[in-house]
Amino acid sequence: MSRIAYVNGQYVRHAEAAVHIEDRGYQFADGVYEVCEVWQNKIVDMPRHLDRLDRSLNELRIDWPMTRSAVEFVLREVIRRNRVRDGLVYVQVTRGVSRRDHFFPPEDVAPSIVVTARSTSPKAAEAQAGKGIAVVSYPENRWPRVDIKTIALLPNVLAKQNAKEQGGKEAWYLDGDGNVTEGGSTNAWIVTKDGVLVTRPAESGILRGITRAAVLDLVQKEGLTFEERPFSLEEAFDAKEAFVTAASTLVMPVTRVDGKTIGNGHPGSVATRLRELFHTATDLRAV
Ligand code: PLP
């Protein structure tokens, strides 16, 4: 079965899917995106993801390429056409195709939209979660508007590649005060020795992760103690547990930070339980 992508109104073979060379996403990274998890034939937290897409588009003054319900339809259709039961669906919207010019294009230029979906292996993800991952810190070097989910991910690419070259799976950005902001494509959490969950407030310096929000709901449902405040790298070294959250990783235990063992070096019980219960705290929509 060949993969299918949706590109500006058409379902096309993935291998042949293409956008114009003067798409502003290609030339200026002038666009935004969302990634939703597909779990057991259901789309996880689609309303929250589309609310964030709406916010990202508004912040950049890009119009919706079609109605929100049409986008929902296309997400489902691409998932169905690719027979994804467990995986990820990706939607990207850019300011459209126009002669290269930094100024916004004329009003009649329509935004571009691309949707893709692919299967992932729940078994491989569980195996990874059973081992935990290593993260490697990296100086924060992104623009201040990281609250907008833009496709301009070059700093994230470089930070994550640096982590990979040092045996890690994720980067943790460090701000000027030595505090962890977030991961290259995840939000960052620790559990202190006293059992308090700590994650940075979403007001500044991070993307307001949808998985982070669902985990915060779950934490409250479970009656766990949590604080939304910055934490330093030293505090992470000293923590009982650490983990990251994203639609692509769910709750993923962190067992090493900059080569230092966190807790007993194994995935922590809090992270493991939050991972197990994760979908109970999410909105699930049938594909
Ligand atoms: N932070 C960054 C920089 C990200 O790129 C992502 C996801 O791609 C996240 C956090 C996690 O967000 P979400 O839980 O909505 O996937």
Image (cartoon, rainbow, N blue to C red):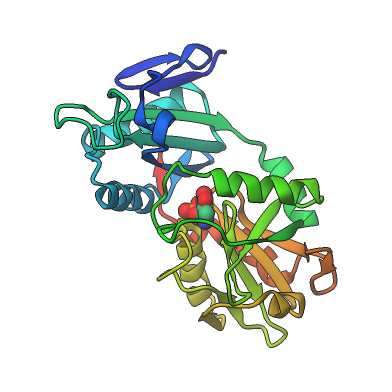
User: Could you say where residue 176 lies in the image, as x and y percent from the top left?
Assistant: 58, 72
17 lies left or right of 161:
left
Q: Is residue 53 above or below residue 88?
A: below
Q: Is residue 88 above or below residue 128?
A: above
User: Could you say where residue 51 lies in the image, as x and y percent from the top left?
Assistant: 31, 52
User: Could you say where residue 80 lies in the image, as x and y percent from the top left?
Assistant: 44, 26
Residue 252 appears in the picture as rendered: yes
Q: Quadrant of the C terminus?
A: top left
Q: Is residue 121 above or below residue 236?
A: above
Residue at the far left in the pictured view: 107
Residue 126 appears in the picture as rendered: no
Residue at 54% from the left image edge and 33% from the top image edge? 85
21 lies left or right of 227:
left
Residue at 30% from the left image edge and 24% from the top image edge? 97
Residue at 47% from the left image edge and 66% from the top image edge? 205
Residue at the far bottom in the pictured view: 194
User: Could you say where residue 16 lies in the image, as x and y percent from the top left?
Assistant: 49, 11
Question: Which residue occupies the foreground of this view, 258 or 240?
Answer: 258
Residue at 57% from the left image edge and 13% from the top image edge? 1
Disc tally is 0
Quarter of the view holding residue 113: top left
4 lies left or right of 248:
left
Question: Which residue occupies the foreground of this view, 76 or 138?
Answer: 138
